[in-house]
Image (tube, rainbow, N blue to C red):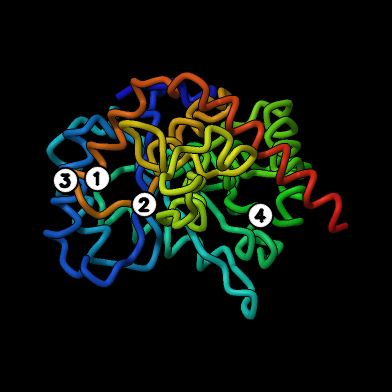
Amino acid sequence: MRYRPFGASGKAVSAISLLLREAPNMTTPHAWRTLVFGAMECGVNCFEITAGSEVMALGFGEALRAVERRLIAIGWRIHGDPRKVLTAEAISNSVRGGLARTGAGYFDVLMLDEAAFETLAPDAQGYLADLRAAGLVLQMGVVGDGDSIDACLESGLFDVLATPFSLVSDWKARRRIKEASARDMTMIAYDPFPAALCRPSSGGGSIRTGLFKRADPLAGAGTYAFLHHTHGWTAEEVCLAYALTEPAFASVQVEQFRAESIERLALITDKDLPTGVAAQIEMARFSADTTDQRRA
């Protein structure tokens, strides 16, 4: 595992971090404890816990007791409801309840999604500063890529931005990364695996001449077909390796529920993209951008 500085916090975090949120097969504290232990053994020391699951928080807390707290970076994510105002009381109950169940003592980052930011009550904004002053939360962060994220960047309330990033990210996403960097915000990438591209490809890479079929050296040029034909690499591994090349990100966040999957991805942090793959990515991106412009 490689490690990167988490902004001005003074902590070094794993290049891959783990998002924890409810899943059908994770119904007991023991299941979450086992998952978190497995991730820690792979070198992961950065976790983001989604509020709302008591068994998840308890399981994480059981794993946390086995390590030094200062070595682990913990985010606590609050989801907003567009139909309800997010009050200071609701934030207090969520944060204090999370701290009690995990035994974390403090959260390194309190993360709000876009709906939470958009529904913040006037008293809630001031309460965020109170949480920081009390040492219950060290930094404030926001999650998303919608229009409200631009308002978050301008507000000056947030220290951390978690935003989607992958090899198909468009110019708007890349512009936002530059703007957040200019504001000295710490950034986390998520959704590095575009689902449509990571599914097995059924396209062919050959042409038929007479009775024989031979490889077409130009088949798939300008497309993402190479994701499924890079020797020794899976499509997910190529996508993750690409996201890791963006120096603006302190960590790339993944969601996995098996220790062996986390270990496989952790190994990618110490590898470079295969020769020629970076050029293929740029060719495919350029082709996609040109197609979108023609459609427009």
- For disc 4, the marked residue is 125
User: Where in the figure is residue 239, as x and y percent of width and height?
Assistant: 47, 39
Which SS class for mark 2? loop
Residue at 22% x, 40% y: name it.
Answer: 39
Point out the frontmost of discs 1 and 4.
Answer: 1
Answer with the quarter of the image where residue 173 lies.
top right
- For disc 1, the marked residue is 261
Which SS class for mark 1? helix
Point out the frontmost of discs 2 and 3.
Answer: 2
N-terminal of the two: label 4 or label 3?
3
Which SS class for mark 4? helix
Q: CA distance from mark 1 to mark 4?
A: 39 Å
Is 181 situated left or right of 12 in this image?
Answer: right
For the C terminus, the image quarter is: bottom right
Confirm or deny contact between disc 1 and disc 4 (CB under 8 A): no
Residue at 21% x, 36% y: name it.
Answer: 40
